[in-house]
Amino acid sequence: MTHRISRQLHDLCDYEPNLNVEGIPLDRFATKFQWDEAKFPAMSPLRELVDKVSESLSRLEDTLKVRSQEYNAVKSDLQQLQRKETGRLSACS
C-alpha cells in the first residue's frame, strides 16, 4: 500500500516526493514507531487485530482510488480545455 501511494505521488508530482506520516519523515516515523493502543489494543486476539488493520488499509486504498480517479478526470478536462484554446481555428467553435 505504501508503495502504491509513493508511486501515485511520484506520478502526480513528477519528482520523488518527500513522504511523511502526520508530518514526520518516514525514516524517523519508522524508527520511533509506537503502536496505537486506542485503535488497536495489543491484548486483542491476533485475528481481530489483523482484521482491523486490513479494514483500515482497505478504506485507505478505496480513498486513494477515488481521489486518483477524481484527479485524472479534472486533469483530462483541463487538457481538453487547453487543446480547445490552442487548437487550430478549424477545430475551435
Image (cartoon, rainbow, N blue to C red):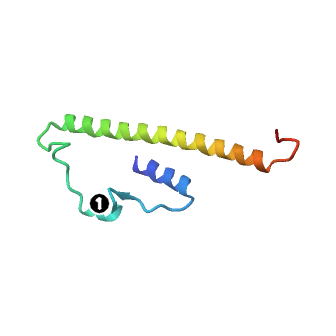
Relative to 92, is 9 on the left or the right? left
Identify residue for label 1.
30
Relative to 33, is 61 on the left or the right? right
Residue 59: which quarter of the image? top left
Q: Quadrant of the C terminus?
A: top right
Q: Residue at x 20, y 43 (%)?
A: 39
Q: Nearer the viewer, residue 7 or 64?
A: 64
Q: Which residue of the protein is positioned furthest toward the front in this rendering?
A: 93
x, y percentage for residue 19?
A: 41, 59
Residue 64: which quarter of the image? top left
x, y percentage for residue 92?
A: 82, 42
Q: Kindly identify the amino acid type of the residue bearing the numbered disc 1.
A: Ala
Disc 1 is placed on an element classified as helix
Q: Nearer the viewer, residue 43 or 70?
A: 70
Q: Nearer the viewer, residue 1 or 69?
A: 69
x, y percentage for residue 24?
A: 32, 62
Q: Residue at x 19, y 42 (%)?
A: 40
x, y percentage for residue 62?
A: 42, 36
Residue 37 lies, with reference to residue 33, above or below; the image says above
Q: Residue at x 48, y 37 (%)?
A: 66
